[in-house]
Amino acid sequence: MASLSLTQIRGSNSVTEFTRLRLKTQRGRGKTGFLKVVGSQGQNQGEPDLSVTVNGLHMPNPFVIGSGPPGTNYTVMKRAFDEGWGAVIAKTVSLDAAKVINVTPRYARLRAGANGSAKGQIIGWENIELISDRPLETMLKEFKQLKEEYPDRILIASIMEEYNKAAWEELIDRVEQTGIDALEINFSCPHGMPERKMGAAVGQDCALLEEVCGWINAKATVPVWAKMTPNITDITQPARVSLKSGCEGVAAINTIMSVMGINLKTLRPEPCVEGYSTPGGYSSKAVHPIALGKVMNIAKMMKSEFDSEQYSLSGIGGVETGSDAAEFILVGANTVQVCTGVMMHGYGLVKKLCDELKDFMKMHNFSSIEDFRGASLEYFTTHTDLVRRQQEAIQQRKAIKKGLQSDKDWTGDGFVKETESMHQPGPGGANVLRQSQSMGSAMPMQQQPQPQPQPPQEASYEQPNGGPNGDGKGTIIDTMARAFVAGAPQQVGQMVV
Ligand SMILES: Cc1cc2nc3c(=O)[nH]c(=O)nc-3n(C[C@H](O)[C@H](O)[C@H](O)COP(=O)(O)O)c2cc1C
């Protein structure tokens, strides 16, 4: 699959320098072609190779610091490189930081514990933080220093400007002079900036987006990723426009527009600033399934409409484990960004992410990221197709005269026995409410069984990461889910499910 292997280009001073030169030349010719997105082919036999090369940028692993507090100054970005992050995306900068005025408090958190307790682990995080309020000159000096100290590591600047061609050109020019390796364009900040026709105001308007992407790509000499807002009906539309307008990659998602809650004593919304609030951006574990859905949709679109080897996709949203990252890669992401996860668990999280991703790869005998990137995409289809497949499967079961085919077949006697016949796992344990995250039950893709009737068996259900409290105990819903997948009516509190 590799079109340009790392060994081919190692002879030059650095991969980054080589690829930047290539990209510059290509852009100079009017962007007639791009370096392909490749994965290194298993260098160390036995140990999975986590390294990736996207848009010509080589990273030791696919884990990228997402734009936000973890990339806000020199000290923390240096820390990220030292801890081993594959790349760092700095906090978004604009020309005039004096216009960026933050408030306090600007964060609110959602906790979830056993039985709905609000004292458990943080699962959702809302922020009304703006882009960087540090002077651009200061940020640029720090980018330059980082690139001097870490010439072979990937530093990506996140930028945002008003609807003004000259302003975008000036910002790109000044940021590129620091030696950064790529640009991520923040078309997605949901609060504050849209009031100035910035961020999500551009990402939600495809005509505006096309025009602004045109300005950016005519000026930029390094790869450009467009960061998408999820606060739109069909995220594939702005993603398509960005790629058609010259961007080399898409990153998704930024935060989801939200109101964290209302204080029931004061009747004031949270986070509460002088008695008032404004909708903010939601992130962390709770957004992961939404992000996965959006990234899957973009990946499908890219696969069918673009040469996916030449464009890259960066998955973002609620990543805290190697399994979360594997899911993004399985639906087509080349890299995986983490923001809130780093704020909660620190920069050392990258080691756990790498170890867990390697464990997953070993389980399936995958030697490189490209070995499994996008492997789950083909299992997404339409609801109509699911109905067709299920009807076929029912016909097969009918043929062997086993199990209930529809609601009319319930007799009212022996529900336990009758439900058992409904729990024959399809390929990948399809009858489980929430797909088991248990790596122990996983099987290499190539070795998955073909759909065929199997004896009734208890389906496995494991709360990811040991339950929301990390104690292996789930919530009422988890208990209900377990009862359901075990095929047994069970009393939960006052409810019988
Ligand atoms: C406090 C905070 C500040 C953020 N600031 C930025 C920003 O300046 N630019 C940007 O593109 N995204 C910003 N984000 C969005 C994150 O990069 C990311 O897209 C989002 O939080 C989802 O990923 P996560 O669940 O890993 O945090 C911010 C997120 C948080 C929580």
Image: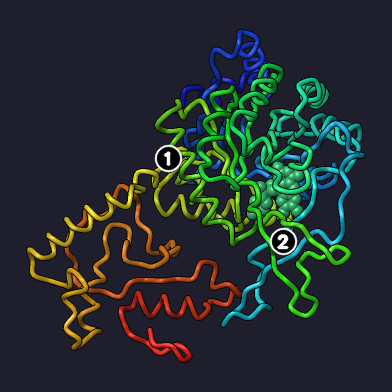
Image mark for residue 392: none
Q: Secondary structure at mark 1?
A: helix
- In the depicted view, which residue is nearer to us: 255 or 182? 255
- Would you place residue 39 above or below residue 108 in this image? above
Quadrant for the C terminus, please.
Answer: bottom left
Q: CA distance from mark 1 to mark 2?
A: 31 Å
Q: Residue at x 60, y 28 (%)?
A: 207
Q: Residues within 10 Å of mark 2 (few under 14, many from 20)?
A: few
User: Which numbered disc, 1 or 2, marks the residue that appears first in the sequence?
Assistant: 2
Instruction: Name the quadrant containing residue 465.
Output: bottom right
Q: Residue at x 22, y 52 (%)?
A: 388
- Would you place residue 459 above or below residue 281 in this image? below
Instruction: Name the quadrant containing residue 243.
Output: top right
Q: Residues within 10 Å of mark 1 (few under 14, many from 20)?
A: some
Q: Residue at x 82, y 65 (%)?
A: 272
- Disc 1 marks which residue? 371
Give left or right: position of 303 versus 149. left
Give left or right: position of 73 versus 211. right
How far from the left and from the top, in percent, is residue 85?
Answer: 68, 45
- Disc 2 marks which residue? 344
Inspect this view and state whether residue 212 appears.
yes
Q: Secondary structure at mark 2?
A: helix
Colour setup of the view = rainbow
Q: Residue at x 65, y 63 (%)?
A: 124
Residue type at numbered disc 2: Met
Inspect this view and state whether residue 45 appears.
no
- In the depicted view, which residue is nearer to us: 206 or 341? 206
- In the depicted view, which residue is nearer to us: 403 or 53? 403
Residue type at numbered disc 1: Asp
